[in-house]
Amino acid sequence: MVRQQRVLIAGVLVLALALGLAAAGYARLAVTVIVVGSLGAAMLGAMGRRIWIAAGVLFAASLGAAPILLRSDLEYGFVAIIFLFAVVWATDTSAYAAGRAIGGPKLMPRVSPKKTWAGALGGAIGAIIAALVVAELSSLDAVVTAVLAASLSILAQAGDLFESFLKRRFDAKDSSGLIPGHGGLMDRLDGFAAAGFAAAVIGILRGGFAAPGRGLLVW
């Protein structure tokens, strides 16, 4: 129990410090804190769970740090955030609607029994449509935007499945009890965390820390 408390405290401190640095404009330092801090928190845990701890800190950090880093781009930051939210929300809504209306073969029944291939495809199509609306309003390249939206939609759904896998792996009904009847933040925002992480990585690799929004959207 003491070891678990140490890991939890370390993880919270890493997240708080990283988000504070990102919000203050120290993007490079924030990313460094996330990477080093996730490894440090993992070293405090049991040997068999260190990989899971490090991945958990990285996954949780992406939930807050990724949108902050994207938004820091003065020219394309706002559009990048709107694009990201549109893709993730459209994916969730369209996947649910298509899955309920069409049904059919299950996507990964042992991990998430209710998800279907029809829902996954519907989510991707919905994400593309929402992204094209953003592209039209923001004068972005439609083809690039559609491909990017489809890719992030797949990653968002993969993040949702990964969260379900983790809960089954560690025999947990929800990630926490923060939201009554809905579990924790990661139960509601798992897809956003995965897509946001990927979007931030793409943006930073292509546009640097100065222009991650441009790096994500302008090809």
Image (cartoon, grey):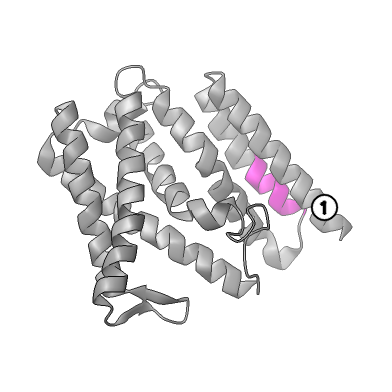
Lateral position of residue 181 relative to residue 4, left or right: left
Location of residue 102 by image quarter:
bottom left
The main secondary structure of the magenta stretch is helix
Identify the residue at image location x=78%, y=44%: 9
Residue 153, image x, y percentages: 30, 54
Up-down relation of residue 170 to residue 80 (above or below): below
Q: Is residue 15 above or below residue 207?
A: below
Task: Please identify the quadrant where the C terminus is shown.
Answer: top left
x and y percentages locating residue 38 in the rendered image: 64, 46
Residue 28 magenta-highlighted:
no
Residue at numbered disc 1: 5
Query: Quadrant of residue 71 in the image?
Result: top left
- Count of marks placed on residues: 1
Residue located 64% across and 38% down the image = 15
Dot 1, crowdedness within 10 Å: few (<14), some or many (≥20)? few
Going by the numbered disc 1, the residue's amino acid type is Gln
Q: Is residue 41 above or below residue 100?
A: above
Q: Which residues are magenta?
A: 37-44
Q: Which residue shows up at 45% across the image and 34% down it?
A: 67
Front residue of this view, candidates 188 and 206: 188
Relative placement, left or right, of 129 versus 20 is left
Tell me, yes or no, whether the highlighted magenta stretch contains residue 40. yes
User: Which residue does the image show at 20% across and 50% down from the upper left?
Assistant: 128
